[in-house]
Amino acid sequence: MPELPEVETVRRTLNALIAGKTVARVTVRLPRILQRPDDPAAFSAMLEGRTFQRVERRGKFLLMMLDGLTLVSHLRMEGRYGVFPSDEPLAPHTHVVFHLSDGTDLRYRDVRQFGTMHLFQSGEEWLSEPLNKLGIEPLTDEFTVEAFERALGRRSGKIKPLLLNQEIIAGLGNIYADEALHLAGIHPLRSAASLKKAERQRLYDAIAATLRAAVEAGGTSVRSYVNGRGEMGMFQHRLHVYGRTGEPCHTCGSPIVRLVVGGRGTHVCPQCQRAPRGAPKTAATGSGRKTANAVKRRLDGE
């Protein structure tokens, strides 16, 4: 599923491709993509003659700002946008086509068909689902260590599922939660309540550093993700734990272990991330002092 870095990269490329272009008409080939309104004729009628002003992002959602309207789009597992000449044949699984007045199309493809689109009058998108309950937006001024501390509060759940909770931090998903936890030297089965102040600071720093690096690399292409120009991301070449089961940890050389935490596949280094009591034996060791020193070196860019 595209996470914050991938959606941010799509936002940037789409903004360059469609800003200033006007919608002539819309073809909806899979109506269930539409959530608001759910009627294709009404959806198309609202958009006809509207001009794309810019593309923004909130968490994992794209916000396509038109004159007077906001289209909120979630890519889910494999949704993707691209701009093509109108006379180019449609690729399989193309479900929504925005025919633009300059002879091009903005096309939405989705093999898994899980994506969603909500259309609002400008400003109303913040008052109801899917945006009204989203948590802190990373990589903005609002994402401070104090705000992160408040968001975690006195929660006692396991830290990995809490990081995936979009009402706490918007945009963080499975890939970058695993990577940030490894960078911070924190096991995903640790409870949030067990984290000391220094560990929360390390985790905050690791989340920000990981997301910044992933955005700079254009996201992670581990399945089908490409940006609005059809280009792959490059952060998959810099992953330390995610998808590397059995491979050596870049920090200590121990084999990466795959666990299931909160129903999600989770990747850890058993040496760098000390497991809580009662965790699987494959993830039960680690040196806190060595981990803290390694984290500092990586955060400092050494």
Image: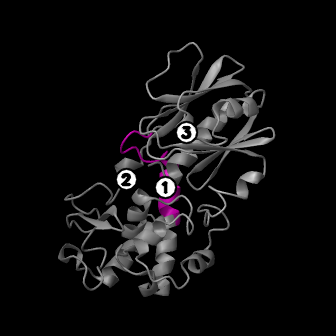
Q: Residue at x 47, y 76 (%)?
A: 202
Would you say the residues marked 1 and 2 are in contact, meaning their CB atoms lie under 8 Å apart?
A: yes
Q: CA distance from mark 1 to mark 2?
A: 9 Å
Q: Is residue 181 above or below residue 25?
A: below
In-front residue for pair 178/70: 70
Would you say the residues marked 3 and 1 are in contact, meaning their CB atoms lie under 8 Å apart?
A: no
On screen, residue 101 versus residue 13, left or right, reads right
- Which mark identifies residue 238? 2
In the rendered image, the quadrant that contains the C terminus is bottom left
On screen, residue 140 versus residue 9, left or right, reads right
Q: Is residue 23 above or below residue 233?
A: above
Q: Quadrant of residue 266?
A: bottom left
Q: Residue at x 42, y 44 (%)?
A: 234
Q: Residue at x 42, y 35 (%)?
A: 111
Q: Amino acid at mark 1?
A: Ala
Q: Which residue is mark 3?
A: 33
In what element is the residue under mark 2?
Answer: helix
Q: Residue at x 54, y 78 (%)?
A: 152
* Residue 7 position in % (x across, y down): 54, 47
- Which mark identifies residue 213? 1
Q: Quadrant of residue 169?
A: bottom right
On screen, residue 212 versus residue 21, left or right, reads left
Q: Amino acid at mark 3?
A: Ile
Number of residues whose C-alpha sits closer than 10 Å to that of mark 1, classed few (under 14), some (14–19) or many (20 or more): some
Q: Please state the extent of the stretch shown in magenta in the rendering.
A: 208-225
